[in-house]
Image (cartoon, coloured by chain):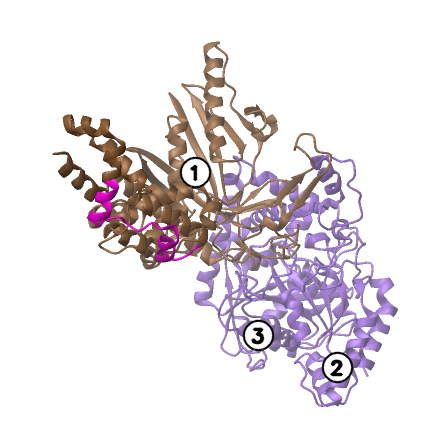
Amino acid sequence: MSLDISATEYLSLVREGGLSVEEFVAKTLERIAKVEDRLHAFITIDSQKSAERARAIDKKIKAGERTGVLAGMPVSVKDNICSTGMRTTCASKMLEGFVPPYDATVVSRLKAEDAIILGKVNLDEFAMGSTTEFSCFGPSRNPWNTDYVPGGSSGGSGVSVSALECMASLGSDTGGSVRSPASFCSVVGLKPTYGLVSRYGLVSYSNSIEQVGPVARRVEDIALLMNVIAGHDPHDDTTAKRKPDDYVQDLDAGIKGKRIGLVKQMAGEGLEKEVSSATEAALARLQDLGAECVTVSLDAIEHSVAAYYTIASAEASSNLARYDNLRYGFDFGNEGYEFKAYVSKVRGNFGPEVTRRMLLGAFVLSAGYYGKYYLKAQQVRAMIKSQIDDAFKTVDLLVSPTMPILPYKIGEKIDDPLKLYLLDINTITANLAGIPAISVPFAISSAGLPIGMQLLANSFEEKALLQAAFSLQQSTRLPGVPI
Amino acid sequence: MTKIGLEIHCQLTRLESKLFCPCKADYRNLPPNTNICPVCAGLPGSLPILNKKAVEKAAMISLALDCKVPDKISFFRKNYFYPDLPKNFQITQYNAYGPTSIGSDGAVQIEGKEIRIRRIQLEEDPGRLVYEGSSEKTQITLVDYNRAGTPLVEIVTEPDFENPRQVRIFLNVLADLVENLGVSDPYLEGAMRVDGNISVGSGNRVEIKNVGSFRDIEKALHFEITRQQSLVERNIEVAAETRHWDEARKITVSARSKEEEQDYRYLPEADIPVISITGGQIEKLRTQMPESIMAKRERYVKKYGIPAQVAEVLSSDKFYSDLFEKSHSAGNAKAIANIITTDLMGFADTREKKMELKVTPRHIADLADAIVGNKLTRNSGKAALYEMIKTGRPLAEVVSSLDLGNLSDASSLEKIIDEVFKEEEKAVAEARQNPSTINYLVGKVMRKTKGKADPAITLEILKKRLS
């Protein structure tokens, strides 16, 4: 019994009684125990409850009872998504002791379909970062080479899925946080259309642009998860009322006759050589598969990094204001403090990247600067959206490398925030425009490091996006994870 | 010249649930921190779900105050750190980047003066701080979040008031208006709170906060006028500042100057999509709105011939005008208006007393019919009313048990008048000389009959006997 099995295959084996969930979950937990000290994907592991749930599902299947569509599927969840009774830390000292009394909608939907949540996985503090180095619990490591970063901020999701510590994971994507680790860890990661998946229970960082997104080893598993988590939620007013598509059906429809545009501004000078040649190969492949490839220019992207960090920081400064350790948080006596002194004392426990963004955000929102920064950033966002809208009048999909460079070493760039911010250039466009984007494993570099390709579609066109991603996946053969 | 502007916070107490979650809007009399959920407690990951009914009620207030209601409304976050704010920001509305609050540019007429309404915004109430003793001397501050998220409208006026008296009249009109609309119970503790700003002459503007009641805002404004004028007389500049009303000492006290430097870093609330309000929805709301106090007043005068002053008093009070609506007919409307405004309102002038009244529309209708049909005198009617209020017994029962029926048969009255003539020889002689003193004799008859004598018939007999 191999752990490297697609969820789709696994679930049908389980349903037919040909595979014991209990055994599979036990084996997965063994795997976690074996590799965790080298990878550090998890913040919390719930071995006991997972084993219990696995047994219960086996029993249900044996008794011929109805089970959910994800029955027995072991998954991990990013630790900024609330789970009842399981602490949700956001990898921050500030929420070290926070145990939510409620489930995020995406978590309750997974549970309702009998998925097994093995535990909560690592991230950059409050999802701010692109390397998972800014976790208060220490960095996660790339399974393809443990000296390297796994990408971020959903690094734990990427690592746990890539290293066979679970079958799939839920991450969150504010500026590329699902796609960056997917690309760096050679797994699939989808950032859905803003409003397609509920954010209720996702701890807000930049609430106008972020979405919960699935990470898996196979595109078909992403489709399966989307069938469960997509759709209107009465607890989230920003979710769309429309009925989501069936993403599994016709997944193999192919891309014959589709027009796919390479985004010029995402494939220019900044690309590392091996990423650049992989991109050329990807275009050739798409053409072989029957698509027509063209080049599309979206010059507003030039301002996207500045606009993104302005908007995201502004919203972060407000969203993170509630962490004053008055109602929940971490162990810290408040005896003898005056309110303001107490608040500034406890808020000193945020890490450096979060602090940087909150300060930047407070500044751009302060009186007299709103128009100069925040409004201007919103104008750039509108410009990007309108250029994207125009582009989709002539093409069906857009394509680019997910990350402009290969994974880099832990510690290599952490002291240069600006350089790190600029590496988000290819992923943030989808967030600012609200459109869906997926990262698909495409190649392994000469040094054995993964390279992912990004496909983007118009709003709510996840079905077409997944069909294209599936085509690309089916035509690609990659080695297994070395660890 | 004195210029006063107001900011009135009015809770939408008639709503079932809070502004962004299903917790009860009525937070009163509950154990601390039991009326909360992940949303109003601001737990990580929770999201606000806008109560659409609150938008409708706030729109009704806007329409009733002649405000413009925009096609699209949106919400903003007002960021500041305070222990009663679970998220450390308040979800409110903000018009600095275009009118997106539920109402703006309205006006109210009070005694011929126009008070302009700058804007009306829908927002959430914070929690409540509970001190040990006074807020200045407390060693412990406790927080109760039961109130957090309660729907509130903030009504901001232009500085159009010239004196505290106008302020009082306006506040009474406003309280009656929201009560009549069925959106708020303004007399519930904390349901309507007022902050003021005031400047004297060309002096700086001073904000007054922390005022507990309508009566106190009038006192606080009087105090401020005197304080500011005496500064001006001594050539001392009035500081632009926020002052708190000290209820115990009846003075305003300078608040810490830091409050002045507050920068709220307003930010659009992306968790609540922009809400479109169509012309059709506005029209529908208008038809759902109860008749306005002014319209009611006019109807009372025109349709029933009720005197303007009585109509004004009656229409302004929702409780009593409702009672009037339920009890009157074309024939007794005027009598009922009189009974309510002269007798009943005297008995029960506070909310608590109104709640204790056992009187029903039926009681009032029967009473008015008896008076109109000369079966009861006004005086006996008052006695009967008093009894009905306390016991809730039907009129007929009250009249017979208290022996209040009208004495209108001539022979019984003749007998009583005989007695009076014997006892009051001097007065009778005087009345023969000077008919204007006849009322003295009428009074004597009334006293002897305990008010039951029909005054018209009594007068008639007296006149006949004296001539």
- Which amino acid lies under the numbered mark 1 shown in the image of this protein? Val
- Which amino acid lies under the numbered mark 3 shown in the image of this protein? Ala
- Which amino acid lies under the numbered mark 2 shown in the image of this protein? Ile
State the CA–CA distance, disc 2 to disc 3: 34 Å
Residue carrying label 2? A57
Whether the magenta-drawn stretch holds residue B64 is answered as no
Which chain wears purple?
A
State the CA–CA distance, disc 2 to disc 1: 60 Å
Would you place residue B391 above or below residue B135 in this image? below
Residue A468 badge: 3
Image quadrant containing the C terminus of chain A: bottom right
Mark nearest the camera among 2 and 3 is 2
Image quadrant containing the N terminus of chain A: bottom right
Which chain wears brown?
B
Whether the magenta-drawn stretch holds residue B410 is answered as yes
Quarter of the image where one finds residue B289:
bottom left
Residue carrying label 1? B156
